[in-house]
Amino acid sequence: MLADGLAERFSGAFAGRSQVQPAEWILESGGMELPSSELTRQLTELGLNVPAEIRRCAPCVRRLARGLPTTDTVWIDALVVLRRLTPYQARRLEAGQGEELLLGHQYVLQAPVHQDPVLKVFEAISRGRKTKSLVSCWQTTSAEGDEPLQRLVKIIRSLASCRDRISALPVETLWERGQLCLVSPHSEGESLSRLLVRRGRFPEEVVRGLALDLMRQLQAAEPFAVHGDIRLGNLRLSRSGELVVLNWGLMNAAAPVVTIHTPLPEDAHDVLAPERIDGQRRATVASDIYASGCVLWQLLAGRPPFTLVDPLTKIAAHRTKVIPDVRTLAPETSEALALLIRNMTAREPNRRLQTYAEIRQQLSGSGRSRGNLREFSRTFELAAPASRIETPKKRSRVPAMAASLLLTAVLVTVAWNRERLGLPELPNVVAAIEKKSQATQQNVKPAAKTVETNAPRTVEQPAVSQSDTAPASKVAAELTKLPAPQNNIVQLSPDGHYLAASLVGAGELVLTTDPERPATIHIRDAALSLTADRVRVEHVRIVVEASSPGTASVAPVQVQSSSLALEHVWCGLKKDHPALAVVNWETTESRDAGRLLVRDCEFVAYQDLLAIEGPLSAALFENVATNGTLALLRLQTGAAAGLKVPVMLNACTLRSSGPVVSLPTGQRLQRSGRISLQGADTLVDLAPGEGLLEVRGNDSHAGWDTHVEIAAQGIVVPQDLILALVRNPATQTIDELDAAPLMIDGLLSGRYQFLPPPAGQNGRERLQIESLPVRFSDRLPGVNPARLPSPLADF
């Protein structure tokens, strides 16, 4: 029921825009209730014109409510649909934390850019002007009062005179709820830390160009202030190829003197100069040079100099150890650049290069131009693009009509002069055309279709022809042994059937065949064993037969390599097979160890998909379908120590799945780096009682939430999601974990179901979407079945 006071509040606003009074308008629109007074107040504080937004959202609210009461949640969802609120703002409002979105009564937070217990960075807009900004918030101790703010104001004022030489210098400082806030101009792009996670090691010429830009800005600010917090998280590469340095002076103001008890951002321990701890000195040019050298080392090697989990252990390593030569991990680095980094990262300050000008001189003439850096930045926009529904361009019909008229005139002329031209009679022509048309129709196979409807929406999988689904039993007598590699390539015959064997190669071992006519590998008494520095399997089908006593206690597919790539692979494993995992991958020591790529693949199995022995450093699943698998990734030793390891799921469908990631317990968990679950346009259909994340083992799992985060951009999960659980194999107990401390972003809950294939078709199940939360993607979640390999009928 509407409150009288609330109706009166909006009557004046509506009167000037419509002849219908608010109460009558509400009655005509189905009796919808307006937002509560509390939500109205919060939206007004965020700078929204509430009466106008209510009128604009009313049709959308009516669709979302479907005849049910229009609660505040429905109004918030409608505002997100119309892009008047961001998903992050909606979550804060629904949690009753709308006040946290406003800083200084001027800046409205829109979305998080970087989340850290100590330092958080947000995208924000200015009320009224709608100008975009980046706001950094450093959590301080209450004992200091506003002293950090006074120090920060002094630093920013001193830097004002070099604003024309440094991009993105801070424009304002704030003190809000015990946080020291710094407002900087907005820049389109991403931090080097995220780009390094996505790409791996940077090319040397790119690193030189970034180093030149960084040294230029630090040299411009040197007469006025030092930065004090040079690290990958504070360096952003814009789309225009410009290096943007964030958070000038913020750490100097919040923590001018650093001790082992000082809370610092996560990656600050990877670049902290030894003298800042030993002598508890303030930041200097020498300490910034040391940090800059560590940054260059990370960009070239793809990881920090010391890959240790405990921050105190990292600090001790910087104090007691010499940073190794970067060529131990990146041997292609030139001697000149490796020597420059070594001189920048000497433990004793007086043995380092002393000025930014000297470093620029050694780098000059060898870095990439701004245009080339712009091209490098754009490579991240083109990498692994999401499939999108293309809107056909409208073309003029005039040329087509003119061509039709011309063709008609030609045909009429030929018909009237058929006798002179020696053409057959018209009945014979018609009969010939009909005969040819019938023959053509017999040879044309029906095209695969994707059907989408508004409510509900269904995606039909392509029908599978009988030639693609021949039972494995029919080819049992045709099996041949896998051939030996020739120049590290195993070229299989199209449509061939092979018996699994052990293959060993040097460098990169490639197992491949004709993409249009994939070969099939049958695993019986012996596993498919692949050993090389790098292993790639593409365009094959792998069948694990039920009678496989030789693979009972191990995985049917065993790989030993530093990196593994599976592309356009179909794999089937019977439900009663005793193996613990489909693939057991033992990562070997190398500079790129633990990099995994799975693209355009389908797995029908009821075991863990990948059991990984050794550290994982990156995993990308793109257009991957699984059915019945338990854990997608079971990490026996966790992530690579000291690293943030991305596990990306792009356009995947995990059907009746177990956890996406299963981590170990005890010391292995404590040594593990942090898993970052990312991705978009993915559907994770968890089996009943399963969690999205899992910790498995008999030992302690304390602190598990510090080794995993969820930073997705649209992963759809069930509405009754269990976020994390712990599984004890010894006691066979499963307990749900408290996920409140976990960093979570980008999970969306929806209603959906899987339907059987249409009658008479031997295809895959169809995904029917009943309702989805607000998403900024124009495609349905899940795989593109047209890109998947054809399955076998036995599965």
Image (cartoon, rainbow, N blue to C red):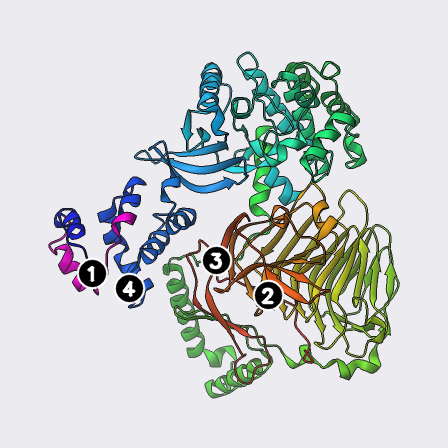
Front of the two marks 3 and 2: 2
Which residue corresponds to mark 3? Answer: 748
Disc 2 marks a residue whose amino acid type is Glu
Viewer-side residue, 341 vs 107: 107
Front of the two marks 3 and 1: 1
Q: Does the residue at mark 4 contact the one at mark 2 (Cβ under 8 Å)?
A: no
Is residue 456 among what the camera can see? yes
Viewer-side residue, 526 vs 503: 526
Q: Nearer the N terminus, badge 4 or badge 3? A: 4
Residue 1: numbered disc: 1
Q: Does the residue at mark 3 contact the one at mark 1 (Cβ under 8 Å)?
A: no
SS type, badge 4: loop
Start and end of the magenta stretch? Answer: 17-39
Residue 610 placement, left or right of 58? right
Distance between mark 4 and mark 2 Cα atoms = 33 Å
Q: Nearer the N terminus, badge 3 or badge 2? A: 2
